[in-house]
Image (cartoon, rainbow, N blue to C red):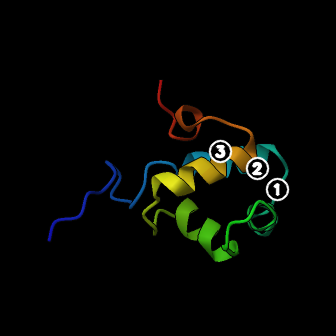
Amino acid sequence: MYKLKAPDGSNNICGKRLAELRSKQGLSQRQLANKLQLAGYDVDHHFVRRIENGERFVTDIEISALCKVLGTTPAELLDIT
């Protein structure tokens, strides 16, 4: 079965942007995971690392959760201009 990949071969298009947005806020991967947990999402820092490294597919629910916690929009997270 064919799986969609980003142009760079990774499993998502938001990983690099997620790392940038997280770093701008001075958050570690673990701190971001903790914020997600406090918002009611059952994740750990491996969740964040795997997204940022392009190892993990990201669902629309996860994009929404990341945006809420980071105070951003899906367009900004996905770097859609």
Q: Which mark is residue 47?
A: none
Three-letter amino acid code at the position of disc 2: Ser
Mark 3 or 1, which is nearer the eye? 3
Would residue 15 be seen by someone viewing this image from the given angle?
A: no
Q: Secondary structure at mark 1?
A: loop
How many numbered discs?
A: 3
Three-letter amino acid code at the position of disc 3: Cys
Figure check: 71 above or below 23: above
Q: Which mark is residue 23?
A: 2
Mark 3 nearby-residue class (10 Å; few <14, some 14–19, many ≥20): some
Q: Secondary structure at mark 2?
A: helix
Q: Quadrant of residue 11?
A: bottom left
Three-letter amino acid code at the position of disc 1: Leu
Mark 2 nearby-residue class (10 Å; few <14, some 14–19, many ≥20): few
Left or right: 17, with 45 as reference point? left
Label 2 vs label 1: CA separation? 6 Å
Residue at the image position 63 percent from the left and 76 percent from the top? 46
Mark 1 nearby-residue class (10 Å; few <14, some 14–19, many ≥20): some
Camera-nearest residue between 72 and 25 = 72
Marked residue nearer the N-terminal end (3 or 2): 2
Q: Which mark is residue 67?
A: 3
Residue at the image position 55 percent from the left and 50 percent from the top? 63
Left or right: 49, with 7 as reference point? right
Residue where numbered disc 1 is placed: 27
Percent of width and height locating residue 10:
38, 60
